[in-house]
Image (cartoon, helix red, strand yellow):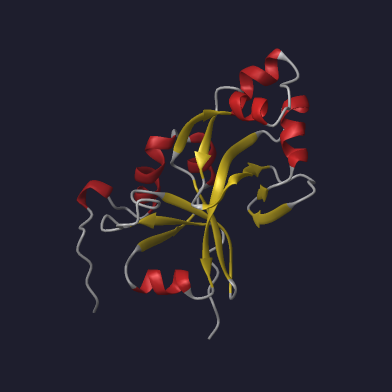
Amino acid sequence: MDTVSLANHFLIAMPAMDDPNFSRTLTYICEHNADGAIGIIVNRPTDLNLAGLFDRVSIPLDDEATEARFAHLPVYFGGPVQTDRGFVLHRPTGQWQSSLNIGEGIALTSSRDILQAMAVNGEPAEVLVSLGYAGWTAGQLEWELSQNSWLTVAANADIIFSTPPEERLPAAMQLLGIDFARLSEVAGHA
């Protein structure tokens, strides 16, 4: 059976999601194939901001303009896998040592060179930095979808990069024409 790729789609956690890592989350799927899936939770900012992260990894922000642009941005909880490792969801894609080109001009990069470029050049223009990612083994995401754990919708990059974190989940729901507050915790199968 062929797997339909959900790369460049949002996963919207259903209200009955009991896993605290994913309850009330909006996850952007970066890769999805027969081997599994990788995503970044895009609506869970942590208390750590980029100024603190850059300090932790000993990369100084080069000038006042770069500091003003990035220092205040939050670092996100990207998911429960490899929470000690950083991932940068960004556009435009650029040329980095370790990047996954997702499509629609968006990439996921996990190499230090992107942080150095942000500190020195203020690029890439739009970023969401996370610690950790969400991962599914082969067939796991498909099974969770069959259990009504998630809703899916084609992603809109403006929700990731231009919408405040607390508004991202409702904005993704609006892409489906659904009000999250009215979504039932009870799922049925026809």
70 vs 155: above or below = above
Displayed quadrant of residue 54:
top right
* Count of residue discs: 0
* Residue plotted at (23% across, 67% down): 187
* Residue plotted at (67% across, 33% down): 125
Image position of 14 (left or right of 160): left
Which is more toward the observer, 96 or 112? 112
Which is more toward the observer, 41 or 19? 19
Where is residue 17 drawn, in percent x and y?
31, 58
121 vs 37: above or below = above
Q: Residue furthest bottom?
A: 1
Displayed quadrant of residue 49:
top right
64 vs 183: above or below = above
Which is more toward the observer, 123 or 113? 113
Displayed quadrant of residue 64:
top right
Where is residue 102 drawn, in percent x and y?
64, 56
* Residue plotted at (51% across, 47% down): 78
Image position of 103 (left or right of 145): right
* Residue plotted at (60% across, 73% down): 35
Q: Quadrant of the C terminus?
A: bottom left
Where is residue 88 drawn, in percent x and y?
63, 43
Where is residue 175 drawn, in percent x and y?
39, 51
